[in-house]
Amino acid sequence: MTRESKKARTERAEQVYNLLVKEYPEAHCELDFTNPFQLAVATILSAQTTDQRVNMVTPVLFDRYPTAKALASAQQEDVEGIIRTTGFFRNKAKNIIGFARSLMAEHGGHVPATIAELAALPGVGRKTANVILGNVFGLNEGVVVDTHVKRLSTLLRFTKEKTPEKIEQDLMPLFASDNWTMLSHLLIWHGRRICIARRPNCEDCAVAHLCPSSSVV
């Protein structure tokens, strides 16, 4: 692809977004949750594993510890036993218990609705904060950059950056702020279903003609 102007890239980004919305009108967060506390814990657990794996352990976890107060008083070993299959279970158990204790100590057990307050909690970075704000509070404060979003954004030449923070800063000006949460869902769904890391299916890709990395001529 020849050098692309900022205007042309923005127009292409809008086309990509609109086509993916048509392709995945039902796109949503695939972590199972019923309230902000559950989504926060599930998102912390989702690091380095799949949403499906997290969804297998959270029913037991939330049945045993349904509130921040309950989880805050949990024994580390008990939580480790429940979440073991998600990987890095010792650190994750420490994080979600610490998260619950901080909620109780600083927020009366309620999940706050600002980036600054969320990011200050154990186990919660900007990515997790964006997940919570976008999916339970309806606040588009940023773009969730996971492995799929990072990979597809690079393939689509929307960014040349390597870190999630810098990739997010490249993506935000390309898309309407009201679409930031959905953008992440769309790229994640597309990455899981069509633009698969080891075997991208460019022939069936709805945005192949807009993708500089497409193998379709």
Image (spheres, grey):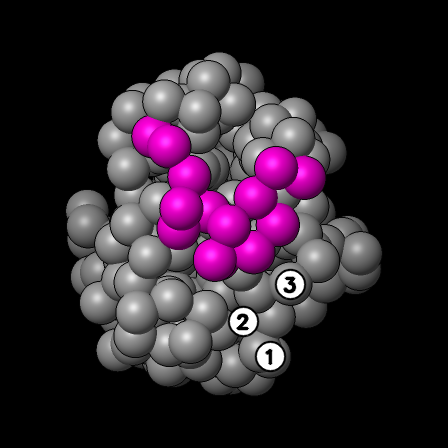
Q: Amino acid at mark 2?
A: Gly
**Residue 95 in view:** yes
Q: State the extent of the magenta-drawn residues as a range.
A: 63-76
Residue labelled with disc 3: 35
Tell me what residue is drawn at x 49 percent, y 65 percent: 132
Nearer mark to the viewer, of 3 and 1 = 3
> Is disc 1 placed on a helix, strand or loop?
loop
- Numbered label attached to residue 138: 1
Residue labelled with disc 2: 134
Is 201 placed above or below 210 here? above
The one of 26 and 108 positioned closer to us in this rendering: 108
**Residue 167 in view:** no
On screen, residue 95 versus residue 49, left or right, reads left
Tell me what residue is drawn at x 22 percent, y 60 percent: 165
Please state the horizontal and vertical placement of residue 72, each as a whole percent of the image. Answer: 39, 50
Please state the horizontal and vertical placement of residue 35, each as a whole percent of the image. Answer: 64, 63
Mark 3 / mark 2, whichever is N-terminal:
3
**Could you tell me if the residues under marks 1 and 2 are in contact, i.e. CB atoms within 8 Å?**
yes
Please state the horizontal and vertical placement of residue 4, each as a whole percent of the image. Answer: 32, 66
Tell me what residue is drawn at x 48 percent, y 73 percent: 110
